[in-house]
Amino acid sequence: MPNINEIKIRLEGLQIGMYVSRTDRTWADLPIQLEGVVISSNEEIDMLNKYCNSVYIDTSKGRSASPMYWIVDSKTSEVHELREDLGKNEYTILRKENYNTVEPLSNEMVTAKNIYDKVEKQICQAFDNLEQGKLVDISDLKDAVSQTVDSILRNPTAFKLVMEMQRSDHYSYNRALATSVWCGQFGRHLGLEKESINELALGGLLLDIGKVKVPDELLKKRGGLTTDEIVMLRSHVDFSVQMLINHEDISHNVMRMVATHHERADGTGYPLGLLNKDIPIFGRIAGIVDSFDAMISKRPFSSVIFSAHEAIGNLYELRERLFQADLVEQFIQTVGLYPTGTLVELTSGEVAVVTAISGLKRLRPTVILILDENKQPYDEFNSIDLAKDKDKTIKWDLKYGDYGIKMDDLFL
């Protein structure tokens, strides 16, 4: 029976404290015993580099290795091992599907609400278990993600709208689910296969689970952090990897996504300081999505909340330095300059909520009018396509709660 704790890694990933269970050489080829031992010196690492091409480590008996150094079979690493061209438009290599909206918003909203109610219970239970130090049933989370992705593929708008309407005060849960949904929408836009979109969405859900091992007072601390506090906060990436590494249901793609979502194109990210060409594409996608959702979320350690429009602008400004520029532009095409669920005020004085993005006219989405020019609620909500209605355009976007609007009162 295979050892689920055993991982094959490249030699660059070797560190003191790792347990080498076996190598790609026979024991007779090694001048000293370097199998079945914990590495205790740099000299032993040098010896393995001299005689071996790869080694197997047992994570139950020693330190783990960053998923960046894992060696897996070609089938499980297909998405991340595209190394012939890591320049512009790499994502086009992954495009396999062209998704169309097959369900009207009104129909899919009903289905999405039912899915959301079930998914919410599964995810809340998982986060409660994490906070109590219990194991998480990954199969339940994969089922929840699969149902969410199915809804996104039928109609990319409905589930996001439902999620905004049902948004709770649980910061970690809200961020995890929102990031998962953004990842699913982005994967749909990029034309990835459904299995890959499921991986993206699952990775988005699990990005920050390691924060349950970071002191709560540190996560909520306002103001500057000490060097030690920064190190502790950044260690959540390693904690996440350690919590997931022994789950058979977690794919290599998801693991590497979780491990690299804080890496940045110019090498200023963490924990490895990778340059863009060395960050797997799912990690690059996660970095963009996670940063965007962080900017528009109410965070316990900051009073600053960006509107979605402002966050998109910030991403665009950072696209050459911190993120892959063309991938940022693809994300902006995915969510639009005014993403689904955004409250907006029109030049007419009316208030509306964005319900669909126009691929060609991103400043003119489809909206549902909810308040008239005097900020009084309409008796009936009417949908208008601003791409066709030349008399009205968006004046600015609003923040959640402006004019006393509660999203859950609008549609559900």
Image (spheres, grey):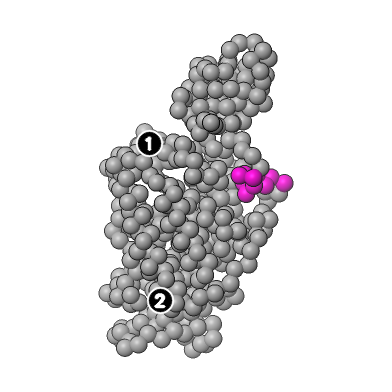
Q: Residue at x 56, y 63 (%)?
A: 188
Boundaries of the magenta span: 75-84
Instruction: Tell me where residue 246 appears, x and y as whole percent.
Output: 46, 36
Q: As drawn, which residue projects farthest toward the top?
A: 31
**Closer-to-camera residue (363/199):** 199
Q: Amino acid at mark 1?
A: Met
- 388 horizontally vs 145: left or right: right
Q: Amino acid at mark 2?
A: Val
Mark 2 is surrounded, within 10 Å at the Cα level, by few (under 14), some (14 to 19) or many (20 or more) other residues, namely many
Q: Residue at x 58, y 20 (%)?
A: 45
Secondary element under disc 2, as helix, strand or loop, is strand
Residue for badge 2: 353
Q: Residue at x 58, y 16 (%)?
A: 34
Instruction: Tell me where residue 313 appears, x and y as whole percent.
Output: 49, 63
Quarter of the view holding residue 344 = bottom left
Label disc, if present, on residue 232 of the rendered structure: 1
Quarter of the view holding residue 69 = top right
Instruction: Tell me where residue 152 appears, x and y as whole percent.
Output: 49, 66
In this view, 363 is above or below 350? above
Upstream in the sequence, badge 2 or badge 1? 1
Q: Considering the whole magenta stretch, tell me its main secondary structure.
A: loop
